Image (cartoon, grey):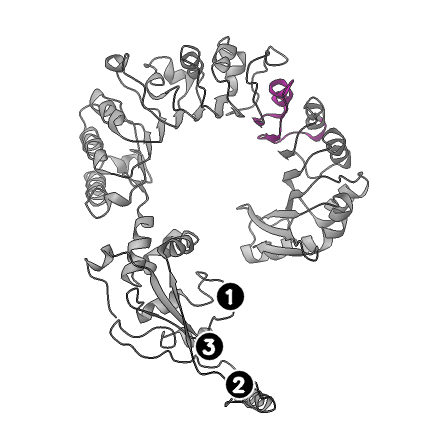
Amino acid sequence: MTTPSRRQHLTLEPLDLRFNNQGGLHPVSPGYLTAPAASLLTPNSGVFPQSPWAASPSSAVDGSSYFPSSPSSRLPPQSAKSPLSPGFSKLLRQARSFTNLGSKRSRRPAVELASRLPPEIWLKVFMHIPLFLLPPVTLACRSFYSLAQPMLFSTISTHPRVAARANAATQKYHKSVFQRVQFFFSPRICPSIVECSISPPSPEEHGDITDNLIDVIFESLPKLPNLKVLGCRYVRLTPKRLDVLQRLQLTSLSLEMCFGDMMDFADAPSVALQEVTFKYSDAAMGREPNPCLLFLSPNHLEQLHATTTSILVTLANSSPFRKLRTLEIPVECVTSTDLFPALSRCPAVQHLSIHVDSVPYPRPPFEGLPDGVLPCLKTYRGPHSLAATFLRGRSPREVDVSLPCHPSRLEASLAGVERSLQSLSFRLDGVELPSSLLGAIHKYFPVLKSLAVKEPALSSSDIQNALRSVPAHRMLEEVTLRIQGRDKFNLWIPPDESAADAVSSFRKTLPALLVAYPQLKIIKLLHGAEGAVVKWCRSTLDGNFIQVSA
């Protein structure tokens, strides 16, 4: 086996693949592949889909019919061994002898068609490979090494997870963290890092070894030339670390329970970030300095996610955020007197999300937003009871109900939403989907194009019964339902069996779905405890549905 040298992996060259008319494939210099890489490109490996030129699996075991044994061997491509039985091969030869086109004399000589695949295509292929399968790809050749190796380290975490807090205080754990940091910030790895997470298992205590180690990590962050996303959890924001954060060219920053002395940076300019996430509790924010102001730049911020009501004070006392498109705030903000002043500083917000940690949640003392507040709002995500409150007087396009709700209460809440809605997603309490709710949705939203019922899990008969008595909706193009497997009392079903249940349910419910939704183009069926999806798309040629994902 020929392994790439340290210098070879720095060369980024397109692969030259040659296909012969017998189904064989072999790359030639400069982007050669060694024999063990053949197992990565077999039809059953999942890297490539089945194609007309794919050879049989039996011929790809040792790679002899695909690849030369080494870069220096310039052997002609060998034909793949036929997987057919000798008897069938004999019949095939006899059939060819009866036609001029199939005779050996009239057959064209073995010619090669050269196709140089640029690195961009291989990058798209590698993006569909699970991360744990990428290491073997890096061993295939120097080109694959250069392309796939950065993907392995694009997202890193400086602190390994531990089972218990006591284990995090051991000398062995601190040594492990130090070794990880040394490796990630080495000259060969640091250019690959795009996203970094600094998350010690417990809050820092001043003067301990964790504090010194995190100082080393922050001092090394400027060595990452491609770092764009940074997440910090339980990290003290010392002046030295804040100075580093101001000098980094980040686009996204996430802070979770990170506090510090902000007095030295009270008059400092805001960090130019496009996306900011604050994960703080109101109880903790009450006794610590507010770090929000330093990281909210009115001229750059596009997405803001916060779980603390103190964000309202920061927004209300800032200049207008004219680029802010996505805003997430906790549900406790609806009772704050700073809500309207803060929202008035966000005139361009199109996507509003109301974060709910616990039930019951507070109700707003108002029936709708004042004129001029969130005039561009198009998307709402949150409790169903607040949808009409925030969307009244607007022209919404999408509503995503985040909490499970009773069908009758959901129906009452949707009655107050404007008729321009195009996408609706919700989860229901109970075990059935009432026909009355579907009928109300069809009536309330005549231009609805997408409907997703993520809960409960429905059997084929449940879906048919729910659709039988509702009027047809002739604008809906996409529907998503969760199906119930045959063994509904089993807490876990193997993924293959669960996917088979989804396919069976699709065949049984398709006629009823087409009667209720004649313009249906996409069907998604959720199945299994992991929420896997099987998707079908309607062909524009014959109108049949084709399964595009399993």
Residue matched to label 3 = 21
| Distance from Cα at disc 2 to Cα at disc 3 | 21 Å
Tell me which amino acid carries mark 3: Asn
Quarter holding the N terminus? bottom left
Give the number of marks. Answer: 3
Q: Is residue 69 above or below residue 166?
A: below
Residue matched to label 2 = 85
Q: Residues within 10 Å of mark 2 (few under 14, many from 20)?
A: few
Q: Position of residue 218 (x, y in %)?
A: 22, 31
* Disc 3 secondary structure class: loop
Which region of the structure is painted magenta? 379-408
Tell me which amino acid carries mark 1: Gln
Q: Is residue 530 visible?
A: yes
- The answer to whether 37 appears left or right of 385 in the picture is left
* Disc 2 secondary structure class: loop
Cβ atoms under marks 2 and 1 closer than 8 Å: no
Residue matched to label 1 = 50
> What is the quadrant of residue 211 in the picture?
top left
Q: Is residue 424 above or below residue 542?
A: above
> Comparing marks 3 and 1, which lies closer to the viewer?
3
Cβ atoms under marks 3 and 1 closer than 8 Å: no
Say whether residue 391 is magenta: yes
> What is the quadrant of residue 298 in the picture?
top left
